[in-house]
Amino acid sequence: MNSNVWIAGGGVICGIGNNLPECLEAFKRMEPGMAHMEYLHSVHRHTFPVVEVKASNATLAEWTGMPEHISRTALLSCVAAQEAWNSTGLGDISQYRVGFISANTVGGMDKTEDFFADYLQDTSKGHLNQVVHHECGAITELVADAMGIRHHISTISTACSSSANALMYGARLLKNNMVDVVIAGGTDALTRFTLNGFNTLMILDPAASRPFDDTRTGLNLGEGAGYVVLVSDALAAELPATRQPWCRLSGYANANDAYHQTASSPDGTGNFLAMQGALEMSGIKPEDIDYINLHGTGTQNNDAAEGAAIARLFAPEYPPVSSTKSFTGHTLGASGGIEAVFSAWSVKEGIIYPNANFHKQMKELPFAPVTKFTAGQELKHVMSNSFGFGGNCSSLVFSKNAQS
Amino acid sequence: MYIYIQGTGCVSPQETAAGNALPATVSPWEGARLKAWEPDYKQWIDVKLIRRMSRVIKMGVAAAKLSLQEAGVEKPDAIITGTAYGCLDDTGVFLSKMINQQEEMLTPTAFIQSTHNTVAGQIALMLGCHGYNNTFVHKAFSFESALLDSMMILREGRLRSILTGAMDELTNHSFNILSRFDIYKKVPVTHEQLLKSDTHGTVAGEGAACFVLGTERGPNTKARLSGLTTLYKPAGKAEISADIDAFMAAHNCSQSEVSLFINGRNGDASGDEWYEHVENTIMAGKPVATFKHLCGEYPTAASFGMWMGCRILAEQQVAAAAMFKGEVPEKFEKILIYNQYKQTHHSLILLSVC
């Protein structure tokens, strides 16, 4: 039960790159991905910038070998899950008991909303193949089937913290020896449903978002997918010398803010409890954390609550912090997975990611985000935060060495 | 470590929410759609909140409250839910307005309540529960994943009680659309005819069932959750047989110890062949009870089956309407529940009296 959970690899696709190396280049060059909508068709296309994956469904289908007509959410998922698996050097997937735990928030909504336009005119109309993958779980199964995974599959949806919880559940499956290896993370494509939903909440920034900046006014929506591959001590020992694990998933915790359906409590109670719980499980103190990959959406409320919780837990010394959402946008159900890949890679390569668009210190906080890309540092422990609607708060800790 | 079922609660097409027991008389339905019998929610929820809540939220909260009451637990250490479709009504409302109003002049309430974790979040909010909170949304494994997560967490030994449940609502839109996939009966059937109809299709259902799981016995604990497993897309009936054998062996349960076999027969001729196979092989000679003629078919219907199994163990009797074949046993000690959904998602749950 107390065995380690190792990160054997990872894969990501988002608006700043179609794989991890491309994303790293974008961070180095300080090139955030906000742009006008190219693939999403919305009346708001000239109002709100988004961070789209720069590939059509046809292209994604070609890369994955999946049919073009299925949900973009599944196509994105497959690209990142395949990259994650291939990065491990584990070889033929059929020789393992594999778990695929994928999160998303709206399933095949990108197709459902097309179906619904016809259906509302006449309930006998609308192509059923556009709604057959509406359920969140259908997205996971499309990818599991394409990759030949059937030992344990599941889907989690806790709004913006969804895929962090997928890593936790995946880690438990490993610790209980139910599987040999788990591909865990999440996916979400941009949809009109979510764009309009966030617009009604008046938290979309018509310019590039400014997480943890005093002048921040909202978030930019993004899309993508991100997965890590979790393995136990036994399988980690079998990895080829050239493909050693990136790091360990040493701690995780999930807590509920229990304050409001969408807003965070002013003192960030849930955020605090999640970070505190993750540190406790890792067996480390706040001062041992060398970098925090923030939830950092760029909304007034979110950043204030997360900042307050960090101030309370980490005072008086603060580790370097940054929000990679200032590059990728907020990818919702995918964000925890994408940021888990970035954070795990950060431990491996000693990378601290920059926070774009930061100019003005938040009055209420004693710390500011890092604005420059650096690599080659000695990072022992990196924390990744994901907080969402419904009060769902999750924190993960990635650590360098084996538990002594 | 044993996992005890300290309390149960269920809102279903039967009057299960009234007395937390399966009534002797079965509520009739019309067409191919069973609607949940809804209790007076005011006993658990503030009237102002009730007006804003969709049915799936109200059903989920009511089932949660019923199970917590029976368990004598005010605030569980964690809340874990499973829902295949999530908050369909609010999703449909927001989607329809978005399309009809060309993405203009929309209001946030339906969007806020459309997220799949709304029910678990609302329960946490109402109870002031800051503990672990998770929602699984994997089709007909949603409930089973929530149960498995709960079991794994309890076995870690840090938490004492977890509220675990599943909820799914049927809306006019979802019933219309699912009907177009040709999965429901074309000709009306009664609850007595459904399981013997030998024709294509089933009837649609909905509901919520919650359980308080814990590592210790509570004041009203009558059953243990002894085992759970899932099987995705088995190659054929031989594979499910092997899986049941392995499951029973893993839990040191012989065929002779099973007092009652509950399965998910839903009246769809080809789907019911799976149950028929198990009834005639591994479970040959065992009394069989069924539940989908009482709750209808939906992806998290296994939660109703587990609720019914728990009530049978607690009361040591089974409602006549639930019996499908065989003699009613004198004592109920172990109950095996086998459910499959659309022949792709199979699950096994083992309950024991305590």
Image: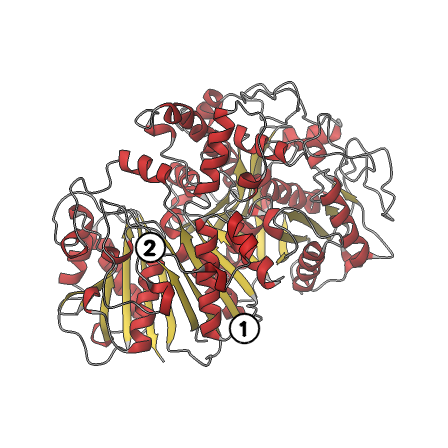
* Amino acid identity at mark 2: Ala
- The x and y percentages for residue B70 are 45, 73
- The x and y percentages for residue A123 are 33, 28
Q: Report the number of numbered marks.
A: 2
- The x and y percentages for residue A151 are 38, 51
> On the picture, is B179 further left or further right than A305?
left
* Amino acid identity at mark 1: Arg
Mark number for residue A87?
Answer: none
Sequence order check, earlier mark of 2 and 1: 1
Q: Which element type, helix, strand or loop, lies under badge 1?
A: loop
Q: Where the C terminus of chain B falls, by quadrant? A: bottom left
Q: How many angstroms separate mark 2 from mark 1 (CA)?
A: 26 Å
Q: Quadrant of residue A111?
A: top left
Q: CB under 8 Å between callouts 2 and 1?
A: no
* Residue A120 in sight: yes
Q: Is residue B257 above or below residue B274?
A: below
Residue bearing the label numbered 2: B301
Q: Nearer the viewer, residue B199 or A212?
A: B199
Nearer the observer: mark 2 or 1; the answer is 2
* Residue A4 in sight: no
Q: Chain of mark 1?
A: B
